[in-house]
Image (spheres, rainbow, N blue to C red):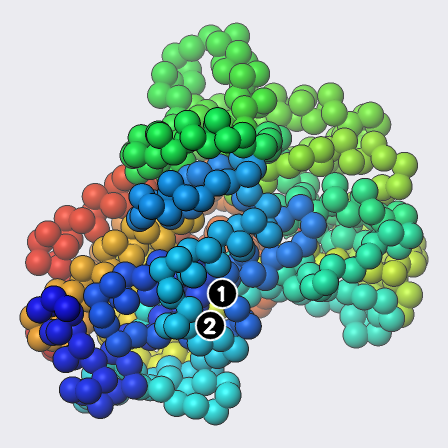
Amino acid sequence: MSDQTLTLNKVGRDEAGLDYEVVVIGAGVAGIYQIKRLSDLGVNATVLEANSDLGGTWYKNRYPGARFDSESYTYGYSFSKELLDEWHWTERFSPQPETLKYLNYVADKFDLRQHMQFDCFVDAMDFDDDAHVWHLSLRDGRTITCRFVIAALGVLSVPTLPRFEGMDDFAGESFHPFEWPDPAPDLSGKRVAVIGTGATAIQLIPEVAKQAEHLTVFQRRPNWAVPLGNGLISDEEMADIRSRYDDIFDQCARSPGGFEHTPDRRGFFNVSREERVALWDDLYDKPGFALWLQNFIEIFMDETANAEVAEYVADRIRQRVDDPELAERLIPKDHGFGVQRLPLETNYFETYNRENVTLVDSTETPIEQITATGLKTSAEEFEFDVIVYATGFDAFTGAFDKMNITGVDGQKLRDKWAEGPVTYMGLMVHGFPNLAILAGPQTAATNFPRAVETSIDWATPLFEHVWQQGHTRFEATAQAEQEWFDHVVAMYEPLLVRKSKGWITGYNSNLDGHEFGNMRYNVYNGGGPKYTGIITDVAADNYRGIGFDGS
Ligand code: NAP
């Protein structure tokens, strides 16, 4: 055992009389890696997970068609060469069951389950500012004390249902895709409704259409979507990927979005229309987010540039849908291409050519109520056996709001964040000492595991610093937090995303206070490299903007 480990054990349970030195909340992609780092240091730490097993988003989202939109080999952890050498991704975009298997493999390989407790929902967290201790109240009645809490809650872990009259009256089966029943319901011979056409619905609609007797999709606003381009990864390809992992992760670290895709920097207006179309022809058929993230950066900032690429994608949709009137309904008219999170699809548009699929425009004929046998719109009554509410999430702050988190002077985090998150670098919050947040609100919006590793590779040395210096308290200063917030706001200014009506900017029609125009600054838009540069610089500058032990 190293001197370092001995020191850390001393600041754990024995010395301070606490249950744990660190509690990590959440055993998803972030919690798994964070507990690996803490257990390597010999810290007295545990993971509390509300679900009955690990995996977070990949434990919950079992709907048909659920899979990565990130290339599998850029989604996996990069921290262990041995793990990279052992694991074989079978598909370019891993399906949910394989991803869950991967996360279990990682936990077992590094013997991490011993540090995890399941079915542990944290109802409340209270900070004792005299003792510098968090008191956690669990739904099972237990209370736990710890010095530090690390929130690894995920950004899309609280599903939201619509608020239609009569939802409890429906006699058939109804569920959100996040709560897809396990074992999966047999949809053959069933009349199925899917409400919503976000990324989740766009993945599940083609799969449900294959099984159901009839599928009716209720679309309020169409989304842009481009082909995923999935395929199997052969042994030879996997060997090649393994030999390139250093370059792949290096490329992810250098790209704004944390992918291998990097923007075309020739300048939209510096090349001819023919050259632009040639690029789009090439990118449309490339896998993953190519058309989104290898495009000209002007499409994210300039209405004219955006309109031109949007029209290009609209034409591709028209080519794929047999009925021209239906095609027009599937083309977004209220927002430009790529200003909301772009869903990727496999035969989504062709699905509407099937005889057993109907699209209902919920803007023209809104859903008025759910009935015992189906639902009623302003124009018609429908009968269904199953209703799928693919209606989104209380994104970014929902999982924090569900816990009653009380910081210094009785302040509630949900009050502080009532109009949107305010953080220092997305990693901590003034007034809530000894709380670190992983890949949460206001961190760079990148390929999720890349953001996770960035957060953890920054937060873990912060904790080591705290322990080495003998501190028992850290907190972001009010000034540093304000400066970060101002910077986050400024990064939205040049981008069309600021006008978008999606979860990234806090819109959710099923939640009060999340109306369109009620802008929430949920992400850091400066890109991964700039974000990593800033937090690295802060650490090197003696953790600028963070006070220790009341200093
Ligand atoms: P979403 O993008 O928020 O979409 C929700 C959908 O439900 C929208 O079409 C919305 O319509 C509709 N809706 C909500 N409330 C409604 C109501 N009361 N009546 C009628 N329609 C209603 O949610 P999501 O599809 O679950 O996707 C969220 C995010 O999860 C994605 O953007 C993505 O980041 C992530 N995700 C990732 C993957 C992946 O990586 N493979 C897969 C799935 C999801 P309006 O647009 O009109 O509000």
- Identify which residue is drawn at 46% across, 72% down: 49
Q: Position of residue 325 (x, y in %)?
A: 82, 30
Q: Position of residue 469 (x, y in %)?
A: 7, 70
Q: Position of residue 519 (x, y in %)?
A: 46, 55
Residue 14 appears in which quarter of the rendering?
Answer: bottom left
Callout 1: SS: loop
- For residue 303, side relative to residue 258 (left or right): right
Q: Earlier in the sequence, mark 2 or mark 1?
A: 2
Does the rendering let one see residue 191? no
Residue 54 numbered tag:
1
Any atom of ligand 1 within 8 Å of the CB at mark 1? no
Report the front residue among 7 and 286.
7
Residue on which the image places disc 2: 49
Tell me, yes or no, whether the two marked residues, 2 and 1, touch with CB atoms within 8 Å.
Answer: yes
Counting other residues with Cα less than 10 Å from the Cα at mark 2, is it few (<14), some (14-19), or many (20 or more)? Answer: many
Q: Position of residue 47 (x, y in %)?
A: 39, 72
Q: Is residue 341 above or below residue 300?
A: below
Residue 519 numbered tag:
none
Foreground mark, 2 or 1, reads: 1
- Identify which residue is drawn at 8% across, 69% down: 3
Does the rendering let one see residue 459? yes
Kindly report the distance in space between the C-alpha atoms of the residues bearing marks 2 and 1: 7 Å
Report the front residue among 347 and 110.
110
Residue 128 appears in which quarter of the rendering?
Answer: bottom left
Please, what is the three-letter code of the amino acid marked with disc 2?
Glu
- For residue 8, side relative to residue 47 (left or right): left
Please, what is the three-letter code of the amino acid marked with disc 1?
Leu
- Identify which residue is drawn at 38% across, 28% down: 262
Counting other residues with Cα less than 10 Å from the Cα at mark 1, is it few (<14), some (14-19), or many (20 or more)? Answer: many
- For residue 385, side relative to residue 280 (left or right): right
